[in-house]
Image (cartoon, helix red, strand yellow):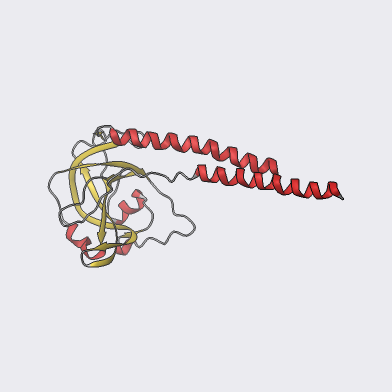
Amino acid sequence: MLAVLLALGFWQVRRLAWKEGILAEIAAAEAAPPVALPASPAPFEIVVATGRYLPVVALYGAEVRDTPRGPMMGGQLLQVLVPETALPKEGPPILVDRGWVPEGALAAFAEAAPKVRITGFVHPAERPGWFTPHDDPARVRFYTLDPARIGAALGLKTVAPFTLMAMGPPAPGGVPAPAEHLPRPPNNHLSYAATWFGLAVVLVVIYGIWLGRQWRR
């Protein structure tokens, strides 16, 4: 048991170094200037795409947020960007997550828009998990960020195999509210390592107490 606890502790120490490396990469990517969207963006790379939105919208996920009118249910506004110089030649449309909007505001974005410039990061396609709610294509409400499935529901024949997650300050009026930073995974490995090593110490102490009693007998 002592060997198992020590192995788990050292495993978490290695995980700590791995996670700190990822967080350093994210911090470096955030500090670097955005680049034109390449065909294969590097992990955590902040990119820029220019084009026009199609007059189609969808909602991803479900989240309650505080608004000036009180708590409201909403989700992530999804729109389709037709790139001006796409990927890097005549590429497919790109699904863009523009940020959180209340459910009642979705229709306001269902119209063609002038040329826009989007700064964000690339999110790979997701697969539904065991407990992921079922998508509702009829209501254009989705719970798995799968561009192919969402694009088909919006009438697109082809779509880029990723989602561009918009970044920046909220739009006038507060919606949509895009991401302001790159996502950062939690880093609790130091506390996990301390827990396993602490249990190893407790085990040694308890065994020492038991061994002392046996010796006195």
Q: Image check: 50 left or right of 158? A: left
**Quarter holding residue 94:** top left
**Quarter holding residue 3:** top right
What is the x, y in percent for residue 210?
A: 78, 50
Residue 182 visible in this rendered orientation of the protein:
yes
Q: Image check: 99 left or right of 200? A: left
Q: Measuring 37% from the left and 58% from the top, which residue is drawn there?
A: 143
Query: Which is more toward the observer, 89 or 215?
Result: 215
Q: Measuring 40% from the left and 49% from the top, which residue is drawn there?
A: 126
What is the x, y in percent for residue 191?
A: 52, 45
Q: How many numbered discs, if any?
A: 0
Above or below 184: residue 136: below
Residue 161 visible in this rendered orientation of the protein:
no
Q: Report the residue that reaches farthest toward the bottom.
A: 70
Q: Report the residue that reaches farthest toward the front.
A: 216
Q: Quadrant of the N terminus?
A: top right
What is the x, y in percent for residue 178?
A: 25, 50
What is the x, y in percent for residue 101?
A: 25, 59
Q: Measuring 79% from the left and 46% from the top, which residue is drawn there?
A: 211
Q: Image check: 131 left or right of 102? A: right
Q: Report the residue that reaches farthest toward the left.
A: 114
Q: Measuring 75% from the left and 45% from the top, which residue is drawn there?
A: 208
Query: Which is more toward the observer, 118 or 178?
Result: 178
Q: Report the residue that reaches farthest toward the right.
A: 217
